[in-house]
Image (tube, grey):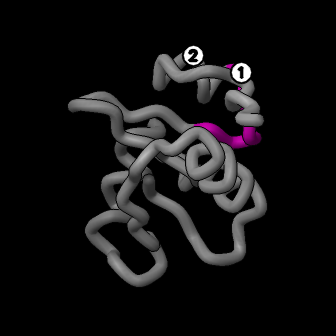
Amino acid sequence: MYCTTWCPDCRRAKDFLRRRGVEFEEINIEEDPDSEDLVIAANHGKRKVPTIKVGERFFACSPFNPLLLAEELKIPLNPEIKS
């Protein structure tokens, strides 16, 4: 996941993934200029975060959309509640 520290959509996406047990690598584009360039190229000239790489495909989840994120990653929208 390509993100920044200040982005509320990034925080929401990370929380969403953690609650579902999805492992991910976090790459801060403000600390890595090459990653920032990649995000801009993947989003047709726009610096959109979070941008998530799935396989060889990129998609932006900004504004944060839990339904889109669940569909893109093929994970449950709602985490299972364990008793």
Q: Secondary structure at mark 2?
A: helix
- Residue furthest bottom in the image: 31
Residue 65 shows up from this direction = no
Residue type, numbered disc 1: Leu
Alpha-carbon neighbours of circle 1 within 10 Å: few (<14), some, or many (≥20)?
A: few
Q: Are marks 1 and 2 in contact (CB under 8 Å)?
A: yes
State yes or no: residue 26 in magenta. no
Relative depth, front residue between 28 and 79: 79
Q: Report the magenta stretch's main SS.
A: loop
Instruction: Say if 74 sits above or below 23 in the image.
Output: above
Q: Which residue is label 1 attached to?
A: 67
Q: Residue at x 31, y 29 (%)?
A: 57
- Please give the label number shown on residue 19: none
Q: Which residues are magenta?
A: 61-67
Picture residue at 60% right of the left edge, 55% below the top: 14
In percent of the image, x 71 and y 21: which residue is there? 67
Which residue in the protein does label 2 denote? 71
Q: Can you give x and y, in whole percent of width and height, for residue 38 in the image? A: 32, 53
The Cα–Cα distance between marks 1 and 2, rounded to whole angstroms, is 6 Å
